[in-house]
Structure formats: structure tokens, C-alpha cells
Image (cartoon, rainbow, N blue to C red):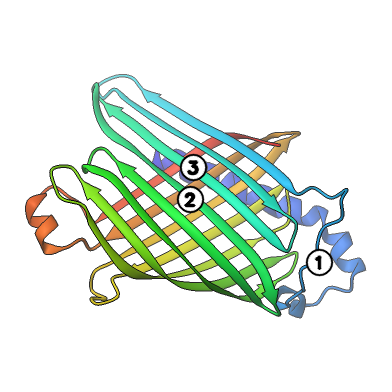
Amino acid sequence: MKQMFSALLIVLTLSCALSAQGETKDVASDKFSIFNLFSYEHPVEKNDDEKKWGLNLGAGYMANQGNTESIDLNYSASIRFDNNITEVKLNWIGFYGETKGKRDENRWNAQGNFDHYLIYRLELFSYTMSDYNEIIGLHHRNTSGAGIKFIFIRNRFLLADLSGAPVYQYEKFKDREKEDEWRWSLRWRGIIAPFNDNITLRYNGFYIPEIKKNDNYRLIHDVYLFVRITGYLGIKAGYRQEFNTYTPELLEAKPDLKKTDATSYIQLSVTI
């Protein structure tokens, strides 16, 4: 699976390069310079005839037969409203796997975001993120909060920003009482071709430490590349890694609990 993912990622990256070559004339006509890559362009509200709504559905499936029989399934859905001033996003991604008929993966992550432009380089944002993982006995984890986002770079080539907020975390594991606490959330994001519907590379990172003890934290890396093949059809290849220090009490109660959970995936997606 990893070799297949790496090979497809190389193919998609080459597609990015070819697509970029196709836009060279447009860039040259605007007298492009290296400083354009790091510039900040004010958002302008979209006109009535510009696209504001978007829907994406994706799924990937792989089955191995032989000495080791396995099934790997991943699925995702997202809907977005964006008029350049206000953006609302809902995302869902899930993973399911079996090896020799035994279920070894069944988890999902859902996230909702609200962003609203305030003044130069500043946005107000709020988000909620939920997780479920049957294999480690996580019934539900939710992290929700609101804060301020600072935009370093915003143009047709790159988007880079940093956001921070106090968040409330609820967590419930099987056979354990629920735990809830206040944490900090720091998110950094980088996007190549952020406003291109045909090809884009996106990365999000989260650092979510407990307010009173920063040695208890979660760290998330989420990156994916999307390339439109034709019409509504495209390919999405991604990688998600989650690290959680957990508490000594939880690790003692669940000795098989791993701190790091990483997944690579490939999807055929439909974008409307």
C-alpha cells in the first residue's frame, strides 16, 4: 500500500508540474516576480455569478488475496461555502480495514470550520473536531473553540496562515469515565494553488496541549494533493498522522494503546 501511494504521489506531482507549465503564459503576462509568491492580496467578496458552493465525495478501496488477505477502505465527504469574506466548511474522512477476516481499523474524523474576514490579515474563526476509533476504544473525542487567525501569505500561488484559540476537549474511552478539560489549539496551514479547482496541495498542522500541563498534548499533520482528471472526476492522495501523549493513567489502563497513528490513502473523488 505504501509503495502504491508513493508511486501515485509522484505521478500526481508530475501532473502538478505539467499543469503549472500550462499557466506560464498567464503568469508572464502579469509580469511575475519572486515577490508575488509571498505577497498578501486582500480578499474581495465574490460576485453573484461566481461559484460559492462546493461538494466533494471520495472513496478508495484495495483488497489483497493470497497468503495474507486484507481489505482497506477509505471514504470522505466535504461541503463548503466560500464568498472570500466568509467561509464555512464541513469535512468527514473515515478508514476501515480487515486482515485475515479480523477488523483492525475502524475510525473517522469530522471537522467543521467557520472563518470570517475582519481586517487586514486578520480573520475570526471557530472550529469543532470529532474523532472515533473502535480499535483503541475511543468512543468520542471532541475539541471545539474560537479565536483569531493571522494570514502571512495570500495570493493565487500560496496561502499560509497561523491561528490560535482556547478550546474545550471532551474525551470518552471504553470502560473509562469521560474526561473534559480546557486546552490551547495552535494551527498552521500551507496551501499551494489555494484557489485552483483543478489542482492543489494542502497541509494542516495542529498542536493541542493541555493548558496546565504542556507535556500532555496532541499533534496532527494532515496533507493531501488533489488533481482533477476530467469534468467532475479527480484523484486525491493524502497522509494523516496523529500523535497523542495520553496520560500515564490511560496508558497504564490500556497497555496496547499506541501514541502515533498514521494513514496514507488514495481516493477517486467527485467534485461539484
Taking the image as shown, residue 39 lies to the left or right of residue 72, namely right
Density class for disc 1 (Cα within 10 Å; few <14, some 14-19, many ≥20) is few
Provide residue 51's location: percent of width, then percent of height.
Answer: 79, 47
Residue name at image x 56 percent, y 66 percent: 125
Q: Are marks 2 and 1 in contact (CB under 8 Å)?
A: no
Q: Is residue 255 left or right of residue 87?
A: left
Which three-letter amino acid code belongs to the residue tagged 2? Gln
* Residue 170, quarter of picture: bottom left
- Pointer 2 or 1: first along the chain: 1
Q: Please, is residue 137 above or below residue 25 in the view?
A: above
Q: Provide the residue designation for mark 1.
A: 44
Q: What element carries label 3?
A: strand
Q: What residue type is labelled 1?
A: Val
Q: Are marks 2 and 3 in contact (CB under 8 Å)?
A: yes
Closest to the observer: 5 or 181?
181
From the image, tell me which residue sits under label 3: 92
Q: Is residue 246 left or right of residue 147?
A: left
Instruction: Give the spatial CA distance, label 2 vs label 1.
Output: 26 Å
Residue 80's spot in the image, x, y percent?
Answer: 64, 48
- In depth, the one of 271 and 48 nearer the eye is 48
Q: Quadrant of the image for the C terminus?
A: top right
Answer few, some or many: residues within 10 Å of disc 3's Cα (few below 14, many 20 plus, some between 14 and 19). Answer: some
Question: As displayed, is residue 220 above or below residue 111?
Answer: below
Residue ID for mark 2:
111
Q: Which residue is drawn at 88% across and 61% down?
A: 26
Real-space CA distance between mark 3 and mark 1, rounded to the nearest whole angstrom: 28 Å
